[in-house]
Image (cartoon, rainbow, N blue to C red):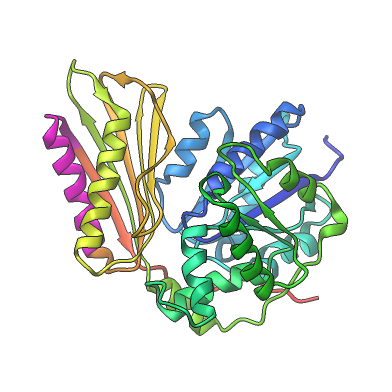
Amino acid sequence: MKKEKIKFVLVGGFLGAGKTTLVGELAKRYSAQGKRVGIITNDQTENLVDTQNLRSQGFEVGEVSGACFCCSFDDLVATAEEFSADQIPDVVLAEPVGSCTDLVATVILPLQQLLGERFDLAPFGVLLKPSHGKRILADAAGERKSGFSPQAEYIFRKQLEEADYLMIGRLDQLEDGEVAELRERLQAIAEDVPVIPVSPKSGEGVDLVMARIDHPSTTSRRLLDIDYDTYAEGEAELGWVNLTATVTAGDEPIDLDWLTQSVVDRCANAVIEAEEGQIAHLKVSALGGDTQSVANVVSNDSGVDVGLAAGREVTGNVQLIVNARVAMDPDNLEFACRDAVAFVCNQRGLEVKSVTAHSLRPGRPTPTHRMVR
């Protein structure tokens, strides 16, 4: 029986912040240290691109679906304990739903107070998505509109307020002046909270994040004063679509990178042209055999980002997954996702064998536990 506590690391941040890429990089580095790593992903519904992405990299991944960690606390604990008995992890990396906040009171403290003999709770880090951060934090200064409602912006800011440390993500895409401006705006919201610029893609700053995770004296457990009515309204603004499809070209090869980038671009353009939606995150994955491609769009004014390049063509069946989180009617969003898949596949003569989709607006958060000191 393993006697050491399992290090439990929760990585927060708004939809599209880059949490999965960071979690994957942390997992690689802990594994390189000889540590066993388990990863837990989280979504309002099933068929999550992130789960498939991390599993394709060889990691052991459990998924909590149907509700956020705070509202499915028992499932979170059960998933952490399901990692095989002879492979009990040294480290569990958990990625909550990107529209969730109040995680210190509803996840971290309950784990600490109820299961402290099993889990060593790391400081809570929150990753900032610069494209939304620039606009939403500018809104706080009364400068310009973000495209999101005040209720959705409320969730974004509350996520930042409860962090033990903050990370400015996508450092490889930012100029020094942009980093300095974001740092200044973050310090105005969370004074005295450490800020780490980081690029999970290039690896820059990840060592500083690991040092923060592994330093217990940095834990302060910042509890929020939060209005759950406003929080619920902000979550309900977002349309949520998870779509899966099986496509094939028979014996002809399929370019996975072209497929994911074309589908996510077509879907993003449909949302923007409709003048209805504000993109929080669009993510498309294509898996053929053991080869995967992932492409993303993280805001209305950002282009297609390649999260994972396949770099080659494949034959046979390809599993396509679309995850869309957009401030718009979920039925209209589902139509845009279905249309994108059909249009792109028709362009290359790909047969769509089956399509299933689940669309929703998140319900009111009802945490299993909510603790204070």
Q: Residue at x 22, y 32 (%)?
A: 247
Residue lying farthest top? Answer: 251
In the rendered image, residue 45, in percent from the top left (x then y), is placed at: 41, 55
Q: Is residue 58 above or below residue 15?
A: above
Magenta segment's dominant SS is helix
Q: Evaluate whether residue 87 shows in this view.
A: yes
Residue drawn where x is 61% and y is 47% of the image: 79
Is residue 255 on the magenta stretch?
Answer: no
Residue at 20 percent across and 49 percent down: it is 338
Question: Looking at the picture, how far across and down is residue 366, in whole percent?
Answer: 54, 73
227 on left or right of 112: left
Query: What is the x, y in percent for residue 26?
Result: 66, 39
Q: Residue furthest front?
A: 177
87 left or right of 327 in image? right
Q: Quadrant of residue 373?
A: bottom right
- Residue 257 drawn above or below residue 252: below
Numbered range of the magenta stretch: 332-353
What is the x, y in percent for residue 199?
59, 44
Q: Quadrant of residue 73?
A: bottom right
Residue 154 vertical placement versus 221 (above, below): below
Residue at figure coordinates x 25%, y 43% from the top left:
263
| Residue 218 placement, left or right of 156 | right
Q: Is residue 349 left or right of residue 246?
A: left
Of the pair 284 and 7, the residue shown nearer to us? 284
The answer to which of 305 and 242 lies nearer the viewer is 305
